[in-house]
Amino acid sequence: MTQDAMRDQMRTGKGFIAALDQSGGSTPKALKLYGIGEDAYATDEEMFGLIHEMRTRIATAPAFTGDRVIGAILFENTMDRDIAGIPSAKFLWEERGVVPFLKIDKGLEAEADGVQLMKPIPGLDDLLDRAVAHGVFGTKERSVISAANAAGIEAIVAQQFDLGRQVLAKGLVPILEPEVTISIADKAAAEDMLLASILRHLDGLDTPVMLKVTLPTKADFYRPLIEHPMVLRVVALSGGYSRAEANAKLAENHGMIASFSRALTEGLTAQQSDEDFNAVIADAIESIYEASIT
């Protein structure tokens, strides 16, 4: 059964998850880093077309297979498009052996109590049903912690788990992502609070979830989550670190794998020949893979 095969790959597969889920707010920056300025498009549709071309180029690169990339997170606009004439999620799994996930959050609320909760997600049931129909395995939902504030962190974790239960009810596996901003002075204290809160909420589950966290201040800090029976996998976001920095920190965290976005696409440009592009993405994939299997 496809879902069982995907679950096995997520639980035991060697490799990492590619985050190809830049949304409307982050797409212009991603395109600029890729060598496409804002003068190259006039509408959102043109912008999303260009970012889809970038994602297609990545997903069809020879090195982008389940041997190294065990999963990929898609933006809704990507899920609704094709890659090589095949619906994107179906292409990833059937042609590449890469487990597809869908980013479902719709951005962040204004900061309160040192955190930014997720905005409401209108039409969530319909979105999750469409994800199931597309053959998506799970979802990803991001919120942000910018201070070691116990009330704010508890609110963010509670919201993540509430949404996670709605995702689980549809037969999908949520990646809960309470990101701790890497630049805050009290990052380690925020991580202490976050870990304690997550462990409390995990005790209320009967179906495993996945977790996506910022690379921690202390190596192996999230080991209790990696070993928890209600956690399928713990993945790390690059959070603004360069690929070299992110890989070095990830390698110190045994059992944790990457789910990198900007650190994955670093060095890729629209102007590269296919040969050069494929070589750069192959090197990136190999380095992130090596850091993920420690």
Image: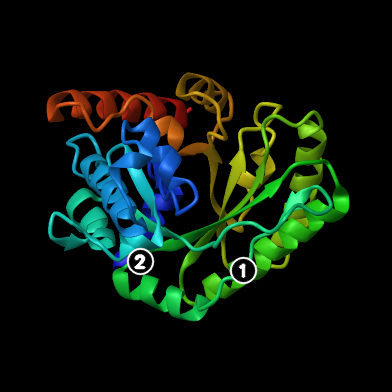
User: At x 52% / y 26%, what residue is drawn?
Assistant: 246
In the rendered image, the quadrant that contains the N terminus is bottom left
The tag on residue 198 is: none
Nearer to us in this view, 281 or 27 = 27
Q: Which residue is under mark 1? A: 163
Percent position of residue 69, x then y: 33, 41
Percent position of residue 227, x then y: 62, 45
Nearer to us in this view, 246 or 24 = 24
Q: Which residue is under mark 2? A: 3
Side (left or right) of 250 relative to 151: left
Side (left or right) of 218 relative to 100: right
Instruction: Give the quarter of the image for residue 224.
Output: top right
Percent position of residue 267, x then y: 34, 24
Residue 98 appears in view: no
For label 1, the crowd category at 10 Å Cα-Cα, with few meaning under 14, some 14 to 19 and many 20 or more, is some
Q: How many marks?
A: 2
User: At x 25% / y 50%, what residue is drawn?
Assistant: 97
Nearer to us in this view, 229 or 121 = 121
Q: Amino acid at mark 2?
A: Gln
Distance from disc 1 to disc 2, alpha carbons, whole Å, reads 21 Å
Is residue 205 depicted above or below 99 in this figure?
A: below
Image depth: mark 1 or mark 2 in front: 1
